[in-house]
Every structure is written in C-alpha cells, then in structure tokens.
Amino acid sequence: MVLRHLMSPLDLTVEEMDALLSLAGRIEKDPKKYAHVCDGKRLATLFYEPSTRTRLSFEAAMLNLGGTVLGFSSADSSSAAKGESVADTIRVISCYADIAAMRHPKEGAPLVASMHSLIPVINAGDGGHQHPTQTLTDLLTIRELKGGFDGLTIGLCGDLKFGRTVHSLIEALSRYDGLRFKLISPAELKVPSYVKASLKTKGIPYEQSERLDADTMAGLDILYMTRVQKERFFNEDDYIRMKDFYVLDREKLAMAPKDMYILHPLPRVNEISVDVDDDPRAAYFRQARYGVYVRMALIMTLLGIEEPA
Ligand code: CP
C-alpha cells in the first residue's frame, strides 16, 4: 500500500474528501461504533508551536478510536531545542508511533518530515501556509449547516494574509461549483496573490473589500472570521494597529442575513464580541466539536482502517 500523508486539502480528491466528511458525519451520529477500531494504534503529536484545539482534538480523536497518544507540545520540550532536525525526529518517531500530526512555524516542515517518514504524517499547520485538518473541520461544519457547498457565497474576514486556515479553505472550496468569495481585510492583510491567481484561473468570482458592513455581508451564506495572527508580525506596532480592525458585535450582526452562519477557526481575540455567542448563527463552538469527528475519520482513512459493519 502507498504511504499517504496529508499536507494540503488538495492531497485528497473531491471524492475522497466527500467520503471522509461522510464518514465523519456517521461517526458523529454513532461514536460508540468506532470505539475500538484503532485498538493497539498510536498517534504522535509533534507540536513545535502552541495549540489547544488541533493538538487536543487529535488526541481526543485517537483516544475515541481506542488508540493511544504520545508527543510533545512545544519545541522547547523536545530535542529540537538541542538542534535536532525534523527529518531525524520523524525517523525516530516512526519507531514509536503508527501516525503523526505535526505543527511547525516553518512553512514546509511537515512536508520535509513526510519525505523521511515511515508512517503517515499530517500537517497540523505550517507557518502561514496551510492547515488542512482545520479545512476538513470547516467543510464538515459548512456541509452540516448548509447541506453542501455548491452555489454558496462565502465571506472571509480579518487577516487573510497570514491566516493559513483561509488559504486552505479557499483552495478546498474552489473545487465545488458556483461558489463566490468576498474577501474582507485591511489593505496590508490581503489574501496572497497566489490564492487570487488560482481563483482567477478557475474563473471563480471574488470581491475584495476593507469594510465589514451591511453591503459586504449582503448575500453571504457563511462569514468566516479570523484573528490577526500576532505571531507572524515582525513589528508589534503593526499588530497593535491592525488587531481590532474588525469587531463583529451584536449591532453589526443585526445587519447580516438571517441565514448567514458565523464560523471562526478559533482562538478568537477581539474580532467576535462575546455578545454574539448566543446568536443562533454563531457556529464556531459547534465547529470546534466537529474537529474531533473529522480527525477520527482522517486517522481511520490514513491508517486504512475498515469501517465496522
Ligand atoms: N484552530 C486552531 O488551529 O486552533 P489551535 O491553534 O488552538 O490548534
């Protein structure tokens, strides 16, 4: 069998992605059925950067499947602090675990690991580049809320330059039919040109705006809010100037469509006011819960585990 890794959402065909999301949906409805499918299997979480949701939802996913977990939650607590390369680290982890999830501040580090690995490697976020398992989570959430992807109008708001979840999500959604994007960001935090070039090549309509208001929210099915990525700024003054550029509060939400759901990969800082949390359109905590089911489905898929009858 060919060893499969997940570096980008595009590593999965549309059919594979739909099958994975369907499996995640079945797991959500009957999690007990899957409680022992990974008995004897071990997941390594190799996190060189902070995380709450991704690391812990990966660990919860493997434990829910009957497997076990090991790993580290910061570069400082691993031999990276002594200068060990990711290539050497993954060679060693391949002796201890059956599958690994890696987060790293450098773009491409999980890809390098996958080239030296004897076990499947999952990119759990690499710098400002990609975050494919957040994308699978986002897709499952959108599919559960809207019933599918075709024809949706998706607004993405905030730090579209450094927000890796945005890049992965646009790439993944671009493979469905009839989508439109509204890209809402400060001029300095616009989506990278390679993402816009890809939209242009595929003939997918998009608009750019600096304002989050009634006009830009009109017609949106989904508003995907993101925080300004403090850790990617070289200059603290720039971060302070940008960090509260958008605040979605109850007053602003009153101008939004009644059937527009709000997503956020979390963590949130100030960009969504807590007074929005009780609005039925606020779906970001539900989204975090879906992250466990989608990672359960991904672990099963990459390990080639059969679904129980
Ligand atoms: N959404 C997300 O990646 O959250 P964490 O940084 O807490 O893993």
Image: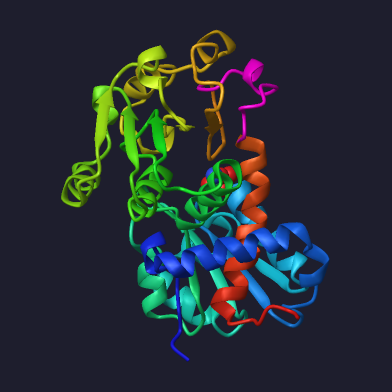
When the figure is inspected, residue 197 is found, relative to residue 86, above or below; the finding is above
By secondary structure, the bulk of the magenta-drawn segment is best described as loop
Residue, x 38% and y 50% (percent of image)?
A: 173
When the figure is inspected, residue 42 is found, relative to residue 47, above or below; the finding is below
Q: Is residue 72 visible?
A: no
Residue 131 appears left or right of 67: left
In the figure, residue 154 lies in which quadrant? top left
Q: Nearer the viewer, residue 307 or 249?
A: 307
Residue 247, percent from left and from top: 48, 16
In the figure, residue 126 lies in which quadrant? bottom left
Residue 99, percent from left and from top: 57, 75
Image quadrant where one finds the C terminus = bottom right
Residue 185 appears left or right of 76: left
When the figure is inspected, residue 15 is found, relative to residue 118, above or below; the finding is above
Residue, x 53% and y 44% (percent of image)?
A: 142
Per the rendered image, the range of residues in magenta is 271-283
Q: Is residue 267 visible?
A: yes
